[in-house]
Image (tube, grey):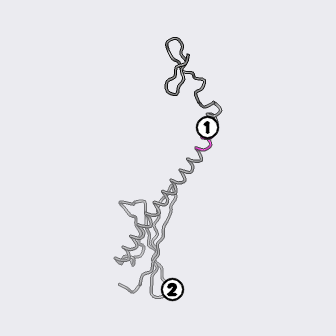
Amino acid sequence: MKCSLSKTTFWRKTSSCRIDRRHEAGFTFAEVLAAMIFMAILLPVVMQGLVLANRASVTAERKRIAAHLANSMLTELIATDQWRQAGSRGNFAPDHELYEWELIQSGWDQDDMQQLTLVVTYPVQGQSRRVQLTTLVDDNQQ
């Protein structure tokens, strides 16, 4: 004798109902094994992509900071006329101690100008990177 509750069919045996498990859906061993193999192949590729994306974002962020610091320092050196001092160099302590700067000064062929290049070096994952900003200033202006 059958008894039915919602969508599950029960077989009546004496006074209790039991579930007929012949029609339940499930995964076979082959399907589970195929899914695991697929994940074993796919997971390292996805992780490598995430690592590369992280490296690229760290590099881009540090380069952005270096460019901002270089622009600020070059502007300050020109505004305060400190660019005239030979051998200007330093770092951006205390906020950015790992970022170091150096001002390179050279003559300009045309007019009475000086070419100023501010080089900021910074580390990214064990390698030293650099950003350069160059501008011209009037050598006669005081």
- For the N terminus, the quadrant is top right
Farthest residue, direction bottom: 111
Image quadrant where one finds the C terminus: bottom left
In the rendered structure, does residue 39 fall within the stretch colored magenta?
A: yes
- Residue found 51% across the figure and 17% down from its top: 17
Residue at 55% across / 53% down in the picture?
52
- Residue 32 or 118: which is nearer the viewer? 32
In the picture, the disc for residue 126 is none
Query: In the image, is residue 96 above or below residue 112?
Result: above
- Give the residue type at disc 2: Asp
Label 1 or label 2, whichever lies nearer to me, is 1
Q: Position of residue 28 (x, y in %)?
A: 63, 30
Disc 2 target residue? 109
Classify mark 1: helix, strand or loop: helix
Which amino acid type corresponds to the residue marked 1 in the rendered image? Ala
Residue at position x 50%, y 53% in the image? 54
Identify the mark at residue 35; answer none if there is no mark: 1
**CA separation in Å, label 1 and label 2:** 69 Å
Camera-side residue: 86 or 40? 40
In this picture, residue 142 sits left or right of residue 52: left
The residues colored magenta run: 38-43
The secondary element bearing badge 2 is classed as: loop
